[in-house]
Amino acid sequence: QVQLVESGGGLVQAGGSLRVSCAASGTILSINFMGWYRQAPGKQRELVAAITAGGSIHYADSVKGRFTISRDNAANTGYLQMSSLKPEDTAVYYCNARVTTAPMGVIREYEYWGQGTQVAVSS
């Protein structure tokens, strides 16, 4: 079983910065994809940023130039550095990962979600 644990959310003023982390634990053969999603009250969950095992990166247009996604493969941890934060960035941020693991010896890819971390940006 693989678990994703997020940390680093909080309250910040507009223009400030925060870094959220996602630590994966368990029997992990590889993390093929790691993404950060967010969901604001009354809105659908949206993809904010993603990084593949090969290093390909995608950002939502709304965060380009302000957010940076990265990963530490040795530590099975992903990061989202958020700068120039705006009130509209307020949301619960969720980590998502597609992980190759081998429960009971069967190797395959599974998708996992973290529990979410609140980011609030005050104006």
Image: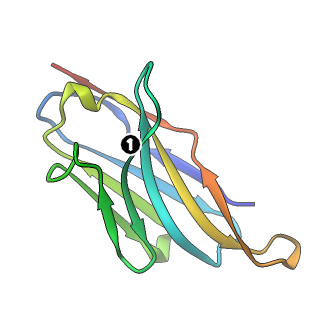
Picture coordinates of residue 56 (x, y %)? Answer: 34, 73
Quadrant (top left/top right/bottom left/bottom right) for the C terminus: top left
- Give, as a three-letter code, the residue at label 1: Gly
Q: Name the residue tied to disc 1.
A: 8
Picture coordinates of residue 12 (x, y %)? Answer: 23, 29
Q: Is residue 100 above or below residue 58?
A: below
Picture coordinates of residue 122 (x, y %)? Answer: 21, 20
Residue at x-position 64% and y-position 78%:
29
Determine crowd level at label 1: few under 14, some 14-19, many 20+ residues with C-alpha closer than 10 A.
Answer: some
Q: Is residue 22 above or below residue 91?
A: below
When asked about the image quadrant of residue 10, the answer is: top left
Q: SS at mark 1?
A: loop
Residue at x-position 47% and y-position 62%:
34
Residue at x-position 46% and y-position 31%:
44
Picture coordinates of residue 46 (x, y %)? Answer: 42, 41
Quadrant (top left/top right/bottom left/bottom right) for the N terminus: bottom right
